[in-house]
Image: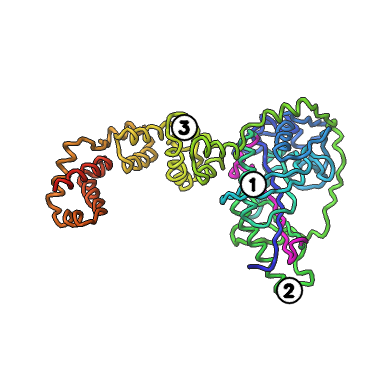
Amino acid sequence: MSKYYATIGLEMHCEGSLTNSKVFSPSKNEYTELPNCNVTPIDMGFPGVLPVANKECVRMSIMMANILHARIPEYMYWERKNYYYPDLPKGYQITQNPPEECVGNGGYIDIEREDGSVFRVEIDNLHLEEDAAQLTHLYDTSTINYNRAGNPLFELVTGPCLHSADDAVTFLEYMRAVYQYCGISEADSKKGHLRCDVNVSISEDPNSLGTKVEIKNVNSFSSVRDAINYEIERQCDLKDEGRYDEEVVQETRRWDEESQTTKAMRSKVDAIDYKYFVEPNIPKIKLDRAWVDEIIASTPELPYERKAKYMNDLGLSAYDATIIIKDIKIATYFEKCVELGVDAKTAANWICTQILGYCYKEEKEIDEIYLTPERLAQITSAIKDGRISSKQGKELFALTLEREEEPEKIMEAEGMKQLSDDSELIKIVTEILNRSEAQIADYKGGRTNIIGYFVGQVMQATKGQANPGKVNQILQDELSKR
């Protein structure tokens, strides 16, 4: 066990991808591969333009603040964060200054681990701001795409209250699901909707903080886990080796995927002075209490509420329910299956094993695959009705995805049917028993588990089409006669 105590704080940036327009301009807020097409003079910072706050973005931010048990202010306003960088064409960012009033101040959220234990994450603030443009650095040049400039960005800042990479990722995964369930964002990392800054320090005293190191713009949860674990190990090594007077230098680093290490970017002795001042072009907004209450009342069912429903009402295990609620697309798929009459436990088993395994292998979302809930219902219904065996069901699953044809059509073309005719099964069982005298003697001698051998022989003879339940019963009846 390490003698050092790790403390972690997170800054989670989630792009609000589900509004029609950007946070301060009428430009389209949509993901597209075509660069620089969703841009107006406001996004480009042209002289004389006037930003206007998007009411839907404000509504979303108030809902999130309430979910985080944060204090919602009486007035909402924005400030200018001044610094020049190519991805900020105005030379400043319209944001909220966390030491002052943000849309969410303080707060907490309780997170469940896979083992059922709960830990609390303290929230410093939640603020609503505009995103910057997208820079792409190539070998000998850089390109810039202004489509993202001005998109609504929700920044959630935790306190220094996490102590392991696994807890940090569990928190991020849950918050990603919350953004999805609330209709705020697709929260799709492949579209650049999620980014995270990580702050890590170690100390020998659990009641004090060590020197903080910041890791900027980590863009996947697996990378967050790897970056934290690497940084903890790096800082522990520095302290043990005593290579520097300061042991660990306060600095900003980046996560390098290729080398799986953090790399120094710049020193950070003090906080950067961004020279904040109140944004003069957007009037301060008084938040009507009746409107705020209406927003709070409209909060949809959240992931943990669905988890409890799945376990208590539908009989799912905590493990299956946890997997299903992680992504709203998976939860929606599951609920549609149940609506179509698929047994909840059966649907969960197919989703958590075959379907998500296929999605992971093919790098597809569950709503992108050919096997819709309606087609899965065809397969499970055929198994339930005894028309095909469980083994044939798995074969049908694979063929449906491979051929992209209706399961019923494939069953007909492949001649898939489960053999359940008693007279035919008795004939096959009799033939097998007639040539298995030694095995019958063993069975009569007390080795009752040898019946599995006979079942296997029947399944082999029928190419897996025999109804296993009927085979077992017929075998017991026929063996009792000998």
Question: Mark 2 or mark 3, which is nearer the start of the sequence?
Answer: 2
Question: Mark 2 or mark 1, which is nearer the start of the sequence?
Answer: 1
Front label number (1 vs 2):
1
Within the magenta stretch, is there residue 121? no
Q: Secondary structure at mark 2?
A: loop
- What is the spatial separation of the Cα atoms under label 3 and label 1, in whole angstroms? 27 Å
Please name whichever residue, 396 or 466, is drawn nearer the observer in this view of the structure. 466
Please name whichever residue, 26 or 207, is drawn nearer the observer in this view of the structure. 207
Q: Position of residue 452 (x, y in %)?
A: 26, 51
Residue type highlighted by circle 3: Val
Q: Residue at x 24, y 53 (%)?
A: 448
Residue type highlighted by circle 1: Ile
- What is the spatial separation of the Cα atoms under label 3 and label 2, in whole angstroms? 60 Å
**Residue range of the region highlighted in magenta in the rendering:** 184-209
The label number, if any, that marks residue 243 in the structure image: 2
The label number, if any, that marks residue 111 in the structure image: 1
Q: Residues within 10 Å of mark 3 (few under 14, many from 20)?
A: some
Dot 3 and dot 2 residues touching (CB under 8 Å): no
Q: Quadrant of residue 2?
A: bottom right
The label number, if any, that marks residue 338 in the structure image: 3
**Residue 476 visible in the snapshot:** yes
Within the magenta stretch, is there residue 205? yes
